[in-house]
Image: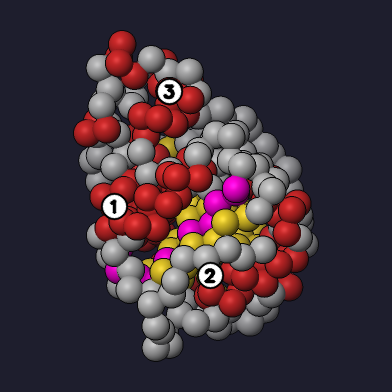
């Protein structure tokens, strides 16, 4: 799939959006590493934290810009303890992945990753619902997939996500006006979430210093899902949501995913945690 975000692929933007680092650590017990081909001899690495139960919910997870899949080695077992599989994937240049990350190939690769994960789950006879989840920068590939309305996707979770790209880039020091970057040149997350009709759960820190809370409020307002939930994490910032709420974080994700495939009423926005 060809996806072009030429202005976001400018070197000054890429230096802000992506902070790749390599990681060759072995997978912990209960996890397996996979290599997903994305074309031209490039592969994207993933680390899958799996429960023994073949009907467990599968969460395809896209991480933030300074993280790698191995950073979730401590959290994978906590998902598993709730009966959830965490399928964490990297971007090009991150972890064990090859290639160089760009905005264009991050979104194009997401489609290839989804196709590969679906085939892998079928081959392994893992029949639980598939949920797409993105944190921070990872909200862009997650919403790219959700907007495609793939019938295999049962739900969407966005943590610390952004609706508008220009304010995020400017907050990180990019001169968008000088580079001629407008919202029309960017990820258009606010439009993509409007195209997603699957159950959606948005959570955001009250004091997020990188992506303001009103960005999450916009995603909630624009969401095309009939069943959607919005949780504000009191006292938290961009990087300490789990630290603030502890096991409740995993319990809430379990609660949300446990309703997938069941009749649901429209949920009201509220505060959890």
Of label 3 and label 2, which has the lower sequence position? 2
Magenta span: 196-206
On the rendered structure, is 77 left or right of 208? right
Q: Neighbour class for label 1 at 10 Å: few (<14), some, many (≥20)? A: many
Based on the displayed image, in which of its 4 quarters is residue 166 positioned? top left
- Count how many numbered circles sit on residues in the image: 3
Residue of label 2: 58
**Tag nearer the camera, 3 or 2:** 3
Of label 3 and label 1, which has the lower sequence position? 3
Residue reaching furthest to the bottom: 263
Query: For this rendering, which residue is in front, 42 or 66?
Result: 66
Residue 247 position in % (x across, y down): 75, 66
Q: Is residue 166 placed above or below 220 in the rendered structure?
A: above
On the rendered structure, is 212 left or right of 68? left
State the residue at coordinates (55%, 34%). 210
On the rendered structure, is 101 left or right of 194? right
Query: For this rendering, which residue is in front, 217 or 193?
Result: 217
Query: For this rendering, which residue is in front, 191 or 9?
Result: 191
Residue of label 3: 170
- Residue 181 in view: yes
Q: Is residue 40 placed above or below 89 in the rendered structure?
A: above
Calculate the distance from the C-alpha at mark 3 to the C-alpha at mark 2: 35 Å
Q: In which quarter of the image is the C terminus?
A: bottom right
Calculate the distance from the C-alpha at mark 3 to the C-alpha at mark 1: 21 Å
On the rendered structure, is 254 left or right of 30? left
Secondary structure of the residue carrying numbered label 3 = helix
Residue of label 1: 192
State the residue at coordinates (46%, 66%). 269
Residue 174 position in % (x across, y down): 42, 18
């Amino acid at each position: 799939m060809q996806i072009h975000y030429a202005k976001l692929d400018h070197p000054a933007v890429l230096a802000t959006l992506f902070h790749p680092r390599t990681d060759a650590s072995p997978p912990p017990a209960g996890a397996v590493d996979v290599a997903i081909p994305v074309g031209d001899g490039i592969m994207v690495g993933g680390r899958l934290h799996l429960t023994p139960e073949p009907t467990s919910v599968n969460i395809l997870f896209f991480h933030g810009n300074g993280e790698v899949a191995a950073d979730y080695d401590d959290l994978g077992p906590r998902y598993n303890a709730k009966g959830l599989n965490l399928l964490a994937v990297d971007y090009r240049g991150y972890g064990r992945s090859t290639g160089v990350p760009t905005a264009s190939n991050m979104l194009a690769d997401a489609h290839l990753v989804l196709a590969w994960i679906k085939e892998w789950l079928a081959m392994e006879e893992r029949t639980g619902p598939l949920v797409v989840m993105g944190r921070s920068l990872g909200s862009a590939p997650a919403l790219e997939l959700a907007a495609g309305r793939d019938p295999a996707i049962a739900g969407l979770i966005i943590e610390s996500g952004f609706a508008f790209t220009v304010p995020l880039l400017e907050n990180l020091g990019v001169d968008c006006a000088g580079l001629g970057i407008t919202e029309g040149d960017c990820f258009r997350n606010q439009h993509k979430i409007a195209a997603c009709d699957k159950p959606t759960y948005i959570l955001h820190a009250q004091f997020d210093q990188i992506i303001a809370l009103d960005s999450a409020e916009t995603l909630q307002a624009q969401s095309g899902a009939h069943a959607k939930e919005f949780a504000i994490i009191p006292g938290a910032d961009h990087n300490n949501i789990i630290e603030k709420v502890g096991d409740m974080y995993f319990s809430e994700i379990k609660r949300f995913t446990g309703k997938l495939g069941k009749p649901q009423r429209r949920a009201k926005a509220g505060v959890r945690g």
